[in-house]
Image (tube, grey):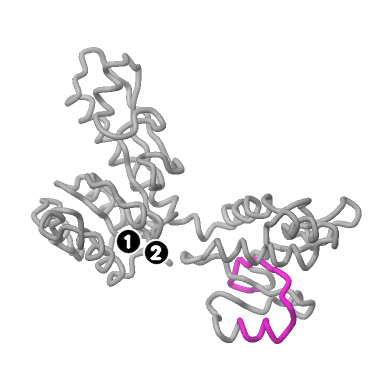
Amino acid sequence: MDKARVAVLISGRGSNMAALIYAARAADCPYEVVLVSGEKADAPGLDLAEAEGIATSRLDARSLGASFWQALENALEEAAVEIVALAGFMRIVPAEVVARWAGRMVNIHPSLLPRYPGLRPHAAALANGDAKTGATVHLVTAEVDSGEILGQVAVAILPGDTVETLAERVLIAEHQLYPRALGEFARRPLDAGWIEAEIDRLAAALPEVSRKSSHGSPGWAVGGTKSAKLFAILADRHHGEDAIGLLVRASGPDEMSGLIEAQPEVYYWPKYYGAAGWLGVKLNRRDVDWASVAEWLERSWRASAPPRLSRLRELAGDL
């Protein structure tokens, strides 16, 4: 199994880290924890990680000062990390670090977001007389606790609950939620349904786009209903191919051959479609550059769009 390489960042004892490590031992778990690090060189969770055979990077944010984040990124790069999981990591991640890990950094928060982001969510839930609270796993964005929600679990608030008793039960729920949500997230880049939805989202930003199948495969076309012309096709392991590929229009066989030779891990010559000028972009990879995919979609759209649409797009300044 192609398992995603995960780094867990902690600040303390790392109980959620431990839940992720032990869940990763299941044969069908789609991720493996390859590194544990954080902001405190003496965090107790680091000792546990080492005892369980996980590599650690003992960094101290206070002593390193401004160089801490670069030291952390160096450790992540050295471990070839693909996903960063924050687990009780008590530092705000700088915007530039978040940007570099956009779509690949996750966090767990002890509330049912979007309610009670930030500090002291249990106290807020109790003060407002809520009947329930819970935990949320979400993507990390520049705004605290505001990224896409990947999973949630609700926890009832009992009469007489204190911040401490409530936090204790929510933590139990976190230990169940985080491995499951991280596992689903790790599988996502290899899932044809999720890939199709992402292409749908990107294609929707282009004018006069509609869905149009091609020999049973999902496709996207531009132009009027009767004259709509295909500019993108999703080929899910067609004719024995390993790739879930986005087929787009290239300028010709010379460009296709050059791209495939230079980056065979990204591009391929799709069976039957390649001879008609369609280039395959492999999307069942964990390192897909979706900005590049969007550029290919627009380029293929332009090659297929009626002249009036291309001119309008240019006039609108969208080049």
How packed mark 1 is, by other alpha carbons closer than 10 Å (few <14, some 14-19, many 20 or more), is many
Mark closer to the chain start, 1 or 2: 2
Left/right of residue 84 with respect to residue 225 in the rendered view: left
Left/right of residue 90 with respect to residue 143 in the rendered view: left
Q: Is residue 47 visible?
A: no
Secondary structure state at the residue bearing disc 1? strand
Q: Where does the image place residue 29, in percent across and percent down from the top left? A: 37, 56
Q: Where does the image place residue 307, in percent across and percent down from the top left? A: 85, 62
Q: Who's the residue at 41% across and 39% down the image?
A: 146
Nearest the camera: 56 or 308? 308
| Residue 34 sits in quarter | bottom left
Q: Is residue 57 visible?
A: yes
* Res. 197 mark: none
Q: Who's the residue at 67% across and 51% down the image?
A: 205
Q: Is residue 19 magenta?
A: no
| Residue 174 sits in quarter | top left
* Res. 32 mark: 1
* In the depicted structure, whether residue 13 falls above or below residue 27: above
Q: Which residues are magenta?
A: 240-259
* Res. 3 mark: 2
Residue type, mark 2 in image: Lys
Left/right of residue 81 with respect to residue 197 in the rendered view: left
Residue type, mark 1 in image: Glu
Distance from disc 1 to disc 2, alpha carbons, whole Å, reads 6 Å
